[in-house]
Amino acid sequence: MGEPGTQELLSLEELEAAGGMRTGRKHVLSILVEDKPGVLTRIAGLFARRGFNIDTLTVGPTDDLSVSRITLTVDGALHPIDHVTKQLHKLINVLKIRDLEPRDTVSRELALFKIAADGPQRAEVLQVCEIFRGKVVDVGRRSVIVEVTGTTDKIEAFEAMARPLGLIEMMRTGEIAISRGRGET
């Protein structure tokens, strides 16, 4: 196996032998941190230094006003996640980290889509919106803005339907997730 930081390509067998890496799995990390300035920068910097591309990143308050939850998704196929989580535990403002298992997690994303909707096309846009249980939140003379909430797959499916209709602009929040049941945070 190559030295850390080299651009040498590795086979799938070599990657799996490198330490229990779960190739192909999207990791959803739920990180509880103290609500202090600079914490997000340090966490994002740690991922960048380790060569991870953060797919989605959301931050928000928790039931405890002194604690924030960072939910981020990364692709575990490219790098072992274990190394970066060990480094995260060493950061002073990090309180708890969980790599959420997809089958034990409820996750959602919010997206806004601005879609061209002139005359007869407006009915088609509204029909697609209804199929995906989207909500029209703004109507203009030549466009509508639709809000869609759901899994990442649902958002991507709606996007695929909206593009041919005349997708003008879209904005996605990134995934948020919570574990099922009364388990730990």
Image (cartoon, helix red, strand yellow):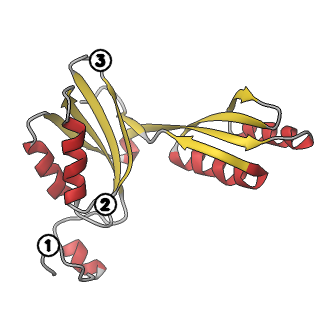
**Foreground tag (1 vs 2):** 1
Which sits in the foreground, 181 or 154? 154
Quarter of the rendering occupied by the N terminus: bottom left
The residue indicated by pointer 2 is 76
Q: Earlier in the sequence, mark 1 or mark 3?
A: 1
Q: Which mark is residue 4?
A: 1
Question: Could you tell me if the residues under marks 1 and 3 are in contact, i.e. CB atoms within 8 Å?
Answer: no
Residue position marked by numbered label 3 in the rendering: 63
Q: Where is residue 185 in the image (x, y as percent from the top left)?
A: 26, 30
Q: Which of marks 3 and 2 is nearer the N terminus?
A: 3
The answer to whether 152 appears left or right of 170 in the picture is left
Q: Nearer the viewer, residue 69 or 40?
A: 40
Asked if marks 3 and 2 touch (Cβ < 8 Å), the reply is: no
Q: Quadrant of residue 91?
A: top left
Which amino acid is tagged 3? Asp
Q: What element carries label 3?
A: loop
- Residue at image location 81% in from the left, 38% down from the top: 142
Label 3 neighbourhood size at 10 Å, few (<14), some (14-19), many (20+)? few
Helix, strand or loop at label 1? It is loop
The vertical placement of 49 against 145, above or below, is below
